[in-house]
Image: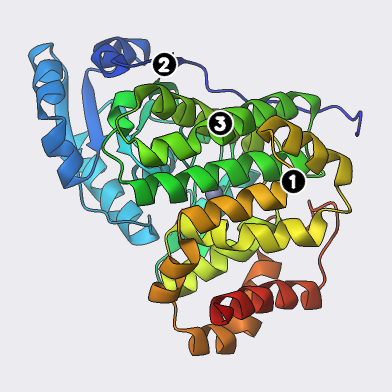
Amino acid sequence: MSQLASTTHFAPRIIHGAGSISNLKAACEAIQATSLFVMISERGKKSLAKTFEHLAANGISLHYFTAFQSEPTTGHLQDALVSFERSKDDGILAIGGGTALDLGKALSVLAANKGLTLRDIPQQGPLNKIPLIAMPTTAGTGSEVTKVTVITETKQKRKLNPGHPSLIPDVVVLDPELTLSMSPKITAETGLDALAHAIEAYVSTRATPISDVFALEAIRAIGGSIRTAYREPQNLQARDDMLRGSMFAGLAFSNSSTNLAHATARPLGTRFSLPHGLSVALMHPYVIAFGKEAAHERYTAIADALGAKSVLYFIEELNALFELKEEARKRLDLDELIRSIPLLVEDALSGNGIETNRKIPTRQDITDIYKNLVTDLMGE
Ligand SMILES: [Zn+2]
């Protein structure tokens, strides 16, 4: 392990536990906000109507922004900026999965820095921002505590993922009750994504003794509860383990990195409109098989934390239980996938997460990884 100096970024304030949503007024006070720009889906807005009524009755004025769908794009962000300009709120509340949270994070920085673009964010020093409260309703992205926002460029269909400490939300509200309504399918895909964040952070060449603590705790929490959360959606303890685990995984990879599973999954998800969690979970086994010898000790420690024979076996078993290949076959045109491999490889090579692998993949290695996916999808 490298003994080089490293800097760790945390979220400044985390309110955690069942029923935490009732502390939103306190969260507003913490960021001195009296007027919130609420980024939430239409459905979420309806289901939390009572919470919003309560906030409004307590003197917080609310403006809603609901014009976004599954994956966040620069188009959504532009619309949010225009809308925010009009509402002139002094705080942002992002509630939802990664989409709402990533849009909220990007908005909180861009709205306070006229003319700044997503691409320019990483090169900046300390940035002004509109204070942001983040409340995840899925246990997957860990976006509530990371310094990265993932936004798809609408025209070029490429994912941008700028990182900057100012993108970290100022208050995080982690309430497992908000995740109870996740379907088993979403629970599985987002949970496997979170597990991949922790595993990739732990095997990354940028792992630090501090990110390792978060990664292993995430692996234990998610590995121990993902099956229960899938089978028993109303199990609050399992939901809390998943949400806490997802947050720890976020702290792990935000301070270390994700690697090849994310580097190969991003283009697959973008080109074929697959959910992020599904594409990561599909690629992860091939990436583990590729790198497991180069990071043997690290994978052994992960297997111990999972209480499993091997990490590869554990992940493959979950993918089979959650029927991910069946789902992929439904959503992917295999002929088109085969034709797209050179493009996917180019995209993967130009994104993040290649150079932080214990074993740096060549163009051919990445081609083979995609071919392995195709073979498996055709095989059964
Ligand atoms: Zn991910």
Q: Nearer the viewer, residue 153 or 98?
A: 98
Is tag 3's residue or tag 1's residue first in the polypeptide sequence?
3
Q: Residue at x 53, y 83 (%)?
A: 337
Give the residue type at disc 2.
Answer: His
Between tags 3 and 2, which lies in front? 3
Q: Earlier in the sequence, mark 1 or mark 2?
A: 2
> In which quadrant will I find the C terminus?
bottom right
Tell me the residue at 56%/57% (across/down): 280
Q: Which residue is mark 2?
A: 16
Choose mark 1 or mark 2, whichever is in front.
Answer: 1
Q: Position of residue 16 (x, y in %)?
A: 41, 16
Residue 9 found in image quarter: top right
Q: Nearer the viewer, residue 299 or 73?
A: 299
Residue named by callout 1: 310
Q: Residue at x 58, y 86 (%)?
A: 338
Task: Give the camera-side residue of 239 and 122.
Answer: 239
Ligand 1 lies under 8 Å from the Cβ of mark 2: no
The three-letter amino acid code for the residue at tag 1 is Ser
Horizontal side of residue 323 vs 295, given as left or right: left
Question: Which of pointers 3 and 2 lies earlier in the amino acid sequence?
Answer: 2
Identify the disc placed on residue 224. 3
Assess whether mark 1 and mark 3 are in contact (beta carbons under 8 angstroms).
no
Q: Secondary structure at mark 1?
A: loop
Does the residue tagged 3 have its C-beta within 8 Å of any atom of ligand 1?
A: no
Residue 377: percent from the left, percent from the top? 55, 76
Residue 85: x %, y % from top left: 25, 42
Q: Is residue 351 visible?
A: yes
Look at the numbered disc 1 and say if its residue's Cβ is closer than 8 Å to ligand 1: no
